[in-house]
Image (cartoon, rainbow, N blue to C red):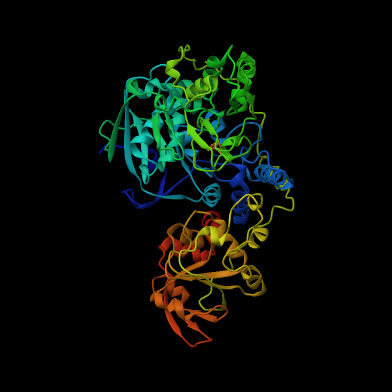
Amino acid sequence: MGKTIAQKIIAAHLVDGTPAVGNEIGLRIDQTLTQDATGTMAYLEYEAMGIPRVKTELSVAYIDHNTLQNGFMNADDHRFIRTIAKKIGVRYSRPGNGICHQVHLERFAKPGKTLIGSDSHTPTAGGIGALAIGAGGLDVAVAMGGGAYYIPYPKMTLIKLSGHLQPMVSAKDIILEVLRIMSVKGGVGKIIEYGGEGVKTLSVPQRATITNMGAELGATTSIFPSDEVTHEFLRAQGREDDFVPLASDEDAVYDEVIEIDLSKLVPLAACPHSPDNVKPVKSLSMTKVDQVCIGSCTNSSYTDLMTVAAMLKGKTVSPEVSLAIAPGSRQVLSMLSENGALTDLLNAGARILESACGPCIGMGQSPNSAGVSLRTFNRNFEGRSGTRDAGVYLVSPETAAASCLTGYITDPTTLPAIAPVQMPETFPVNDNMVDLPASLDEYEKVEILRGPNIKPLPQAKPLENVFELPCLLKVGDNITTDHIMPAGSKILPYRSNIPHLANYCFEVCDPEFPKRALASADGGFIVGGSNYGQGSSREHAALVPLYLGIRAVITKSFARIHKANLVNAGILPLEFVNPDDYERINLNDTLVLDNVFAGLEGAEIRLSDKETGAEFALKCDISARQAEIIKAGGLLNFTREKTLK
Ligand code: F3S
């Protein structure tokens, strides 16, 4: 049976597991990327593994998210990332060089390679034919250390494109159409491949706009073939040697096929507050606009911004509209500056922001109260813009430009068409804002600089067969990761400071818990109800309890991702065989766990309560691989043991 593009890349990188839908498989990772908001923790985790230099072919640390925070914390975080990157063999893309996904596409992503990044829009690189997946910081740290990246083997969806786009209809409208058809849950557990005759009418940046928003479908990733268009793009970036052709086999079998005729597409908008709430722009045409933001990793390429500049040239933005533009990379910005398009944008009344995520991550440019903001970005969830009652519409650069001129949501096909912008034959290549790592002769001398905000990661203690420790916290059902470790702007700058974060652990359930836990010399246990740890995948919700000395969490049941995070941190996740036993344990009781080693192999673990004399049975329902991770003291130790062997 023939293979899809993704199946070929998976087969070439498979190091563990059997490729059948739903099976857990391990992949060798060629490239990694981090951004600064997740990067500090990823590099602290890497450092905790004790592996001197990264084992990937290429790893890049980008600074693009928190470029405007007040206070020393942010600058300290950047300096930490810069110096540790230099030491361990990672390239460092300075603030101002651009958004991670745009720069990675231009300068580093390669067809046929695997890439994981600690940012959910890492699939952008699927536009160039890379198998690119968004992952947690810990996954990225492990991949940098040479460990495999594990995913459930996905289903394969083919989106077959025919025809070609009409003038003023764009790649953004294609992915909005896919979102309309499939919804924000439609891609879960799937890799989405694009094929058909229409593919060759799309440039690499257009393809990247489409794969970028595959994240909004919930897909594992999205990918395009690597063809003559890819070859041309790489040649124009001075990277012709990085080209390899990639296509699915004629007889490849897909689980699902969706057909889209590009010739029939019209400009679309994702209306508040979900990327799949898609309507034709024409149907929204009486909506008054307060703000237009152009940029983000979805739509800030050279051709996107040249199209906007051509539409705005010689005109004036409506006085009712604030227009902000953030070019995706310094390469894009310098090209606009060289060819005069930047002047056209400025003369029309645009505000030019630095090449960074900016308003997409809420760094400035929040709309006015109850405002209407048109954005070329990828997410429009309530409140993400920084204004809770604002309505954000996700649109193409063409629709954004047309609307900022008229002051109303405007279908760009109703304005005179501009000549299509051509891809340049060569891009000006200047990588002087990407610092190279120290050489193998020099790296040992590099000092990692850390301010007071950078604190070491907690380490799991060795596993024992018998534990006698107090119950340090007892909580009820449906505890979320927000209960365990709250988020929010007060806490965000301290992502790399676990001791500081520990002050907030279980703040709303039991504010005395952190003090009580730190006072217990050998740590203790948490006892919880059912569905413990539901909510986000936040790994801090496991790392902070680890810092506070938690050795095991005993519950009626766990939420899946949090349970995996506990294992990765080296904390035992245990469940009552009889959930009613939960009632028989009290806060501060001394609990004795016995038979832990055999429990990891599937036997019952015995728990006795020294205060009441009660005895219970517990189970540790984890995979053989997870049992190895627990025995090693967490995923970082496990990876170190495996890769340094
Ligand atoms: Fe940045 Fe927004 Fe993309 S935060 S990485 S531009 S989704």
Between 242 and 190, the one lying in front of the other is 190
Q: Is residue 30 above or below residue 127?
A: below
Q: Position of residue 571 (x, y in %)?
A: 52, 66
Q: How many marks?
A: 0
- The quadrant of the picture showing ligand 1 is top right
Residue 197 appears in the rendering: yes
Q: Position of residue 527 (x, y in %)?
A: 50, 72
Q: Position of residue 72 (x, y in %)?
A: 74, 46
Choose top left, top right, bottom left or bottom right for residue 333. Answer: top right
Q: Is residue 277 above or below residue 40?
A: above
Q: Position of residue 317 (x, y in %)?
A: 58, 19
Left or right of 629: which side holds 319? right
Residue 5 appears in the rendering: no
Residue that extends furthest to the bottom in the rendered view of this protein: 613
Left or right of 84: which side holds 603? left
Left or right of 114: which side holds 251? left
Between 429 and 35, the one lying in front of the other is 35
Quarter placement of the N terminus: top left
Residue beneath the point at 71% across and 42% down: 442
Choose top left, top right, bottom left or bottom right for residue 510. Answer: bottom right
